[in-house]
Image (cartoon, rainbow, N blue to C red):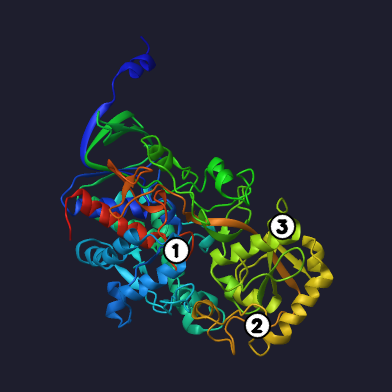
Amino acid sequence: MQDSEIQHITPPRRIDTDVLVIGSGAGGLATAVSAAYRNLSVIVTEKEPVFGGTTARSGGWMWIPCNAPARRAGVQDSREKARTYLQHETGEHFDAARIDAFLDAGPKAVDFYEAETSLQFDLGPTFADYHPTAPGGMDGGRSIVAKPFDGRELGDEIRRLRPPLQEITFLGMMIGSGKELLHFFNVMRSPVSAFYVGRLFLKFLRDMAFHGRPMRLMNGNALVGRLAKSIFDKGGEIWTSSPALKLLRDDKGAVTGARIQKPDGPVEVIARKGVVLAAGGFPQDPIRRKMLMPHAPTGYEHVSPAPPGNTGDGLRLGESVGATVDTSLPHPAAWVPISRPRRPDGTLGTFPHFVDRSKPGVIAVTRSGRRFVNEANSYHDFCQAMVRRCREESGPDGEIAAWFITDHRAFRKYGLGFAKPAPVPYGKLIQDGYLLRGETLQDLAAQFGADARQLDETVSRFNEYAVSGEDPEFGKGTTSYNRSLGDPDHGPNPCLAPIKDGPFYAVRLHVGDLGTYAGLRTNENAQVITPEGQPIAGLYSVGNDAASIMGGNYPGGGITLGPAVTFGWIAARHMAGGND
């Protein structure tokens, strides 16, 4: 017999554990950490060679009302107020049982992580809810982020941590939100900012020289690093390059484990307490995208910054044992406008537009040359408006595209998309076709096929009011969320300035996502349920593999990761038989 034939007939090895987690993003790692600290043995398995999932590429924010950092800062919030807000935001898709479980457990989970694990948090005190004027909305205090983390604490395991999304770093250096980002914007205008950024850059160069990667972990990288450190500290394992092939069941239909393809051969993992599906949803599955995303009729028009491995494995595993995917939500994903800079290897990258939309001197137009939205509103709302306008202008099968427009003054002060502010050069981005430049608005319009006359009228009308800080057409800069991402040193409206000093610049936008909402139906204990609402014994799901509790909406910064780490804590509590 040949070796391959012997391997084929040799039964898989068996490994026993209490909890098997499939997927290594925030939801999966939070479940593993919470289970390990309840004295359960834990294995996390990940199909890709690095762990961290989409979380490691993300901003890392978690939306958890009444959290401990907010309480310490004196933020006045309440469970009832947060529930009112979520009821308004989710509308007819309000899931009372799961939302109540989230609101009850969220503060307890944060307390647990801070007291027992390496996961520590910073508050975003001015990080407003995305609809702060809605009933129950807040001007800040519900979004938290992991504190910066020294990657050297992971030892050799740092090599397996997924690096951040290349496009949202500066030469590979991670940049924090809030005050740190302001220092980068002001580096050429403030000696204090120049010193601050210079010191960080020297540390970054040192890390690259000695370790080959940044060791000052920020944002989602810090969240994953802190959770992974906590797992390793408790003896938990994270397997990489080890996809889950099949769920195992007993003769009563209960899920008892899974078959895993490790690099050295197949393994059957028997999980005494439960299997948790946390494989990151389906952002890179063109088949399910085609089914659920109307703007992507072939499944390939959609662009996602999620890792290539997020292809819906967890959903298919759940469906294989009788679970169903909730496709009733009005939006199957959290939308974000994406532009596509060319990487050094010639492939197209993905740059999610979080901040530049809100800056003074930036507007968005379709090919008609008209604005269509308050650019400073949430990215989810932005993309909805973009699709609606393109459908109105081009019909149901027309192009879905928009362009950010700015002038030279704003461009060199704030940058635009992947193009950085002064003094960073930008000529290569023009050569690659990512950044369009025209000496006049008419020249710019010609480059992306816009109606030049209409674009000129749009900008003239916008400028007329922008001087006095007003936007009667769309209200840019009128909410605390809008203003939080504007320029605090610019007045009278931190989000508005005329677009008048040529040359002018544009970047093309595509519809992308920050995670999928359509996921497996689960209950308030994070148990996967049948179409009849009965739990599938032994099977749980958290993160983007579970249907979102947000009703297809996007209430605030961190509404994917906040529920992910909370329901991870809930799932572990349920598997351990606890009720605290």
Decide which of 29, 193 is in the foreground and name it.
Answer: 29
Numbered badge on residue 433: 3
Q: Separation of disc 2 and disc 3 at Cα?
A: 31 Å
Label 3 element class: loop
Residue 110: quadrant of the picture? bottom left
* 507 versus 37 height, above or below: below
* 322 versus 170 height, above or below: above
* 555 versus 578 height, above or below: below
The residue singled out by tag 1 in the image is 59
Would you say residue 395 is visible in this rendering? Answer: yes
Q: Nearer the viewer, mark 2 or mark 3?
A: 2
Is residue 453 found left or right of 527 in the rendered image? right
Decide which of 516, 42 is in the foreground and name it.
Answer: 516
Numbered badge on residue 471: 2
Label 1 element class: loop
- Ranked by sequence position, the earlier of labels 2 and 3 is 3
Q: Position of residue 245 (x, y in %)?
A: 38, 33
Please report contact status of discs 1 and 3: CB closer than 8 Å, yes or no.
no
Is residue 439 found left or right of 83 in the rendered image? right
Numbered badge on residue 129: none
Q: Position of residue 296 (x, y in %)?
A: 62, 48
